[in-house]
Image (cartoon, grey):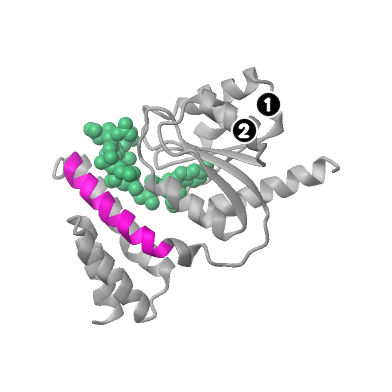
Amino acid sequence: MTHEEILQGLYDFTLVGNAPEVRDLVNQGLEDGIGPESLLYDALIPSLEEVGARFERGDYFVPEMLIAARAMQGALDILRPLLAETGAKPVGTYVMGTVKGDVHDIGKNLVNIMLEGAGFTVFDLGVNVAPETFVQQVQEHQPDVVGFSAFLTTTMPMFKANINALVKAGIRDDVIVMVGGAPVTQEYATAVGADGYAADASTAVRLAKDLIAKRRAAVPA
Ligand code: B1M
């Protein structure tokens, strides 16, 4: 198979949620020398975007979205160690979770993989994380950054609820707050009082490093 055929196959099999074929093609692609980033950004993510577009048009329903997501997760299990394998020095600590009411986690997991690859220690709180859990975990781990992911317009308001909970606990200024997720925009992030917003995983890593560097420069150790 050519590289193009492998990428096309990955796109097609993810779209129909054929997890065994997706796993096989990921392995075959890696054996043939296709980079993990290319498998991700040139096939898997575009396929999930098409899944979302079909859902919006009413051509797909929740079960189709779910099996496509499972196929993607199988691929990520194989790619995770390769994406995270950079030998980077520790750069900071990150507490991350998907907000309350929201169970989407593929995007969050991808951000975590890239953060780990860049040298962050990541505490992943999972999905459907309540404001009080974020507060408790920030108090426990004292991270440089706390990240909130939201993938539904209906769960985005939880950013503000989480920030309010940090304020109430008296720890808002101790931690950098970053937000992200498919429907989130810079304007929304600014409006709720987040310190940073990123549209994708690699920008999220770059921004986290920049925000930490700025904070460390401003606050003498
Ligand atoms: Co849902 N879903 N879903 N879904 N789902 C979306 C998000 C949707 C856009 C589909 C659509 O209509 N086009 C739509 C939301 C519409 C909206 O509110 N604007 C939607 C809906 C409506 C729903 C339900 C309500 C459907 C229903 O039940 N009627 C339901 C909600 C359940 C709930 O959470 N309470 C639901 C359920 C599901 C499944 C469970 C079936 C499944 C999730 C499985 C899982 O995650 N384990 C699912 C899926 C798979 C999707 C789509 C198709 C794919 C999501 C995905 O993984 N994308 C999605 C359509 C789409 O996104 N195009 C959709 C790939 C991923 C790599 O990208 O998630 O954007 P993304 O993550 C990016 C960036 O956002 C960013 O970096 C990531 C990597 O580059 N990022 C950050 C993420 N977090 C960040 C944090 C940061 C910085 C950057 O800093 C802290």
Q: Secondary structure at mark 2?
A: helix
Q: Quadrant of ligand 1?
A: top left
In the rendering, which numbered label is found on residue 171?
1
Q: Amino acid at mark 1?
A: Ile
| Overall secondary structure of the magenta section | helix
Q: Is residue 6 covered in magenta?
A: no
Q: CA distance from mark 2 to mark 1?
A: 8 Å
Q: Are marks 2 and 1 in contact (CB under 8 Å)?
A: yes
Q: Is 86 placed left or right of 26 in the picture? A: right
- Rendering coords of residue 175 (x, y %): 67, 35
For the point 41% across and 36% down, the residue is 127
Mark sitting earlier along the chain (2/1):
2
For the point 25% across and 70% down, the residue is 24
Q: Is 14 placed left or right of 149 in the picture? A: left
Q: Is 80 placed left or right of 47 in the picture? A: right
Which residue in the protein does label 2 denote?
138
Q: Quadrant of the C terminus?
A: top right
Which residues lie in the magenta part?
62-79
Q: Quadrant of residue 8?
A: bottom left
